[in-house]
Image (cartoon, helix red, strand yellow):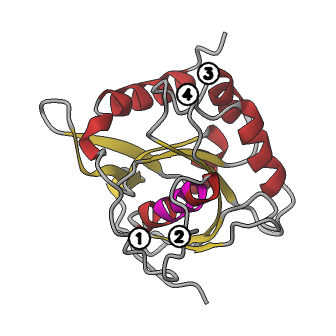
Amino acid sequence: MFNTPAVRRLSLVHTRCFHHSNIYMHSTPALTTSRKKLKLPSDPNSTVYRGKLFEWQTLQAFESLGMALNHIGGRSDGGIDLKGEWSLDDGQRARIPVAVQCKNVKNGCTPDHLRGLLGATVGLARPTLGILSTSSCTSNNKTYTPDTMALFNASALPLGLARVSSAAILDALVLNHAAQRWLDIRVHPRFDPHGKMVSPPLLLTGDGHVLQLRKRDLD
């Protein structure tokens, strides 16, 4: 039913990443984000602690792609946990507004999670790339259900699906059709000759060329 080329590409990327997901799995590292100093609740077993930690892991992981994001998660966050801009240093591209929703869930993100992101980004003043980020530590090794992927590909709004490891590494990012048309970039997973993911695990290209990344603080 959802056997479109885009769904097949998304499935292929996630299948290969899941197959080698143990590459980046180890104890929680010290986060070195250039943003504000990390502040976490006192109880490491609480849901709030795990959720906030994952938000900061996602923030650091996205910095590796040249995104400059601020953590705004909280009761009044409007459904957005991270917000900022993405800068690609190819001399032709403007900064891309980005809004990220982080979901550290055990059984993978569902269409309801994606609809929450759509609702949070559709009313923003500027066209914005909405990204749904989830953890690689899922109980069923599936970060996004098939229905979520179908909704993702059918959306007219620019969207991305991301997977972040416990080591704060962005090991999967997929853009839907709307985002690809708008940004004119492609995200490619990187593997060695033996099929194992290498670091950094993602490569960006535009107009057939590898894009250089830059980190820029927000005003």
Give the residue number, with chain letter if any, for mark 2. Answer: 93
In the displayed structure image, the side of residue 40 where residue 110 appears, left or right: right
Give the residue number, with chain letter if any, for mark 4. Answer: 6
- What span is colored magenta in the figure? 50-57
Instruction: Give the main secondary structure, helix, strand or loop, of the magenta stretch.
Output: helix
Disc 1 packing (10 Å; few <14; some 14–19; many ≥20): some
User: Residue at left 80%, top 65%?
Assistant: 75
Nearer-N-terminus badge (2/4): 4
> Residue 189, how many percent across, how many down?
34, 41
Front residue of 48 and 85 = 48
The amino acid on which the numbered mark 2 sits, given as a three-letter code, is: Arg
The mark lying in front, picked from 2 and 3, is: 3
Report how far apart the C-alphas of labels 1 and 4 lie in the structure: 26 Å
The circle drawn on residue 146 is 3
In the displayed structure image, the side of residue 44 where residue 182 appears, left or right: right
Q: Residue furthest right?
A: 123
The mark lying in front, picked from 2 and 4, is: 4
The mark lying in front, picked from 1 and 3, is: 3
The mark lying in front, picked from 1 and 4, is: 4
Q: Are marks 2 and 1 in contact (CB under 8 Å)?
A: yes
